Image (cartoon, helix red, strand yellow):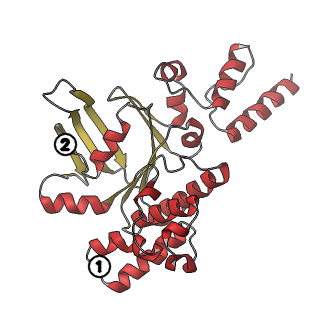
Amino acid sequence: MEAIIQTEKLSHIYSAGTPFEHGALVDVDFTAYRGEYLGIIGRTGSGKSTLIQHLNALLKPTSGRVLFEGRDIWETKERTRQTRFQVGLVFQYPEYQLFEETVYKDISFGPRNMGLDEAEIDRRVRDAAAFVGLADPVLEKSPFELSGGQKRRVAIAGVIAMEPAVLVLDEPTAGLDPVGVESILGNIRDYHRAKNATIILVSHSMEEVARTVDRLVVVSGGRIPFSGPPREVFAHGDELEAMGLGVPQVTRVFHRLKAMGVDVDPSVYTIEQAKAAVRDCLARKGAR
């Protein structure tokens, strides 16, 4: 697989040289590959938000490097500027960042800053709106007239409209009901498939990342102790619990069943896998 964005020995110290000095990241080596759907998990204060803010040059490393397509993103001012268009970052509760008179103007803000012509800006606005499920009539409304869920879609569309090669989302479903969660995750999957973009999803929800991502990166204490497919990462249940993370509830159930002597695979981490594992267990029992 081809690396699209990575860090080399990345460290970041807040308030360096003061009594409040804090090392948020320590020698972090991180890689995201072109076209993958990657999850980042970690408890509050683990360093995951600091990490993702380095990926599009919102924060500058205290030491180490951040590379996009093999080149240091701080190489030149122009390189830094271009990286911010190529690595889109959607903050938690992005709807609080809406500010334009209409939804159309809000979504077009990024493409306009890229210096694109009006026809290309219009195409990108309408494509981005379609990805997040916003109908054309909504584009002429004030974003402040919309529901909370619609505002969230507008904010995500504003980043998607820049057509970034890497889309980083920090808790994009925070505060939404289950229907809203599934809808937003579906929008992100549509963008991932259509553009072959690299998606980096930051989440506190083990269930959410378990059923969504291809690979997981665990951040704890400013370091990355585990990285790999969800099945491998969730196999470290005890260590994750010690970090304040835990595992999906269904994984806990299967670990408990295994401990009780039931012949099941304890690495199950989605409901679909659980159904298949139960069927297999019953089939084996019936064959005896």
**189 in relation to 224, above or below:** below
**23 in relation to 164, above or below:** above
**198 in relation to 245, above or below:** below
Name the residue at 54% across, 22% down: 237
Q: Marks 2/1: CA distance?
A: 30 Å
User: Is residue 242 toward the left or the right of residue 277 in the image?
Assistant: left
Instruction: Characterize the local packing of mark 2: few (<14), some (14-19) or many (20 or more) Cα atoms within 10 angstroms.
Output: many
- Percent x, y for residue 159? 40, 63
Instruction: Please tell me which of labels 2 and 1 falls first in the chain.
Output: 2
Indicate the secondary structure of the residue bearing disc 1: loop
Residue on which the image places disc 2? 65
Residue 11 seen from this side: yes
- Percent x, y for residue 106? 41, 71
Asked if the residue under mark 1 is in contact with the one under mark 2, i.e. CB atoms within 8 Å, the reply is: no
Instruction: Characterize the local packing of mark 1: few (<14), some (14-19) or many (20 or more) Cα atoms within 10 angstroms.
Output: few
Check disc 1 and give the amino acid type. Leu
Name the residue at 72% across, 20% down: 257
Which image quadrant for residue 30? top left
Disc number for residue 116 = 1
Disc number for residue 216 = none
**Position of the C terminus by quadrant:** top right
Check disc 2 and give the amino acid type. Arg
User: Is residue 140 toward the left or the right of residue 220 in the image?
Assistant: right
